[in-house]
């Protein structure tokens, strides 16, 4: 087995591990998004509840004030009945009219505040209905995440021990190059050679699509050492079908 072949085994295992973690990460991201939305709804409900409480308190204060003015109106009416002169009667009547106008204004304000309380309570109900829906989605997402985690746990263990075995077979220098490339390219340390034109012997890198000179392809064919893409530096490998094709071509020549 050439170093490239050994690296390729390692690479394939890494890709499987990455595929599994990607699945769990997607489930986790979805679950966390649901959690965030729930938290946001809770904050909105809490703000609406505070506002509803404040509006209720305002309405209650206004109603108390209206009752106070009712008492005052009662007193003034009594005084009007007991007025000793037309002048006194007129003075009390003027005051009565002012107090009545005040009462009217405060009562209107109280009714408006109560209307706002009703509107706020309706808004809270809407938020709570939305929360109930969101909570259902959230619970399903939590379940999905658990299932994904459970399903991949044993598979991941298996792959990790396979990876350790595969890594042990790779020479240290090649290993450190592989790890470095993997870090730089989100796990994609290797790339396959793609044959663009057989007759013209044109090849390119499967990752960056840049041209790979035929000399580099020869290095890969010889299996002597690892070959890097001249552009992206990824370690190149030859897909099985292409290698078989080369084998056939050379067999035909000899
Ligand atoms: Zn490349």
Image (cartoon, helix red, strand yellow):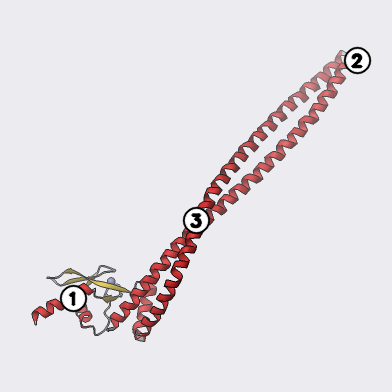
Identity of the residue drawn at 23% across and 83% down: 223
For marks 1 and 3, give the CA distance. 48 Å
Rendered location of residue 168, percent (x, y): 38, 85
Instruction: Examine the rendered structure and indicate whether residue 116 appears above or below residue 156.
Output: above
Quarter of the image holding residue 220? bottom left
Within 10 Å of disc 2 (Cα), the crowding (few <14, some 14-19, many 20+) is: few
Q: Is residue 83 left or right of residue 218?
A: right
Rendered location of residue 135, percent (x, y): 54, 52
Please name the residue that numbered disc 3 is placed on. Answer: 140
Rendered location of residue 27, percent (x, y): 45, 61
Instruction: Examine the rendered structure and indicate whether residue 167 appears above or below residue 124.
Output: below
For marks 1 and 2, give the CA distance. 125 Å
Please name the residue that numbered disc 2 is placed on. Answer: 84
Identity of the residue drawn at 59% across and 48% down: 44
Label 2 secondary element: loop
Identity of the residue drawn at 44% across and 67% down: 151
Q: Is residue 213 visible?
A: no
- Disc tally is 3
Label 3 secondary element: helix
Within 10 Å of disc 3 (Cα), the crowding (few <14, some 14-19, many 20+) is: some
Q: Is mark 3 within 8 Å of ligand 1?
A: no
Please name the residue that numbered disc 1 is placed on. Answer: 244
Quarter of the image holding residue 63? top right
N-terminal label among 3 and 2: 2
N-terminal label among 1 and 2: 2
Quadrant in the picture for the C terminus: bottom left
């Amino acid at each position: 087995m050439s170093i490239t072949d050994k690296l390729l085994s390692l690479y394939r295992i890494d890709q499987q591990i990455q595929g599994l973690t990607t699945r769990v990460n997607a489930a986790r991201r979805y679950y966390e998004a649901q959690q965030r939305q729930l938290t946001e709804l809770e904050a909105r409900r809490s703000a609406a509840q505070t506002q509803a409480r404040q509006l209720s308190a305002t309405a209650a204060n206004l109603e108390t004030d209206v009752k106070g003015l009712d008492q005052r109106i009662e007193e003034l009416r009594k005084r009007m009945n007991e007025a000793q002169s037309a002048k006194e009667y007129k003075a009390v009547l003027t005051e009565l009219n002012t107090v009545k106008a005040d009462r009217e204004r405060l009562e209107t304000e109280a009714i408006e505040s109560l209307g706002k309380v009703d509107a706020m309570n309706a808004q809270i109900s809407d938020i709570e209905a939305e929360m109930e829906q969101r909570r259902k989605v959230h619970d399903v997402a939590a379940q999905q995440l658990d299932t994904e985690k459970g399903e991949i746990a044993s598979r991941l263990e298996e792959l990790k021990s396979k990876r350790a075995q595969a890594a042990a077979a790779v020479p240290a220098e090649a290993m450190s190059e592989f790890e470095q490339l993997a870090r730089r390219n989100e796990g994609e340390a290797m790339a396959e050679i793609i044959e663009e034109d057989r007759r013209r012997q044109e090849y390119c890198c499967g990752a960056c699509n840049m041209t790979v000179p035929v000399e580099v392809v020869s290095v890969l064919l010889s299996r002597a050492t690892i070959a890097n893409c001249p552009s992206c530096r990824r370690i190149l490998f030859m897909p099985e079908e292409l290698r078989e094709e080369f084998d056939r071509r050379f067999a035909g020549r000899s």
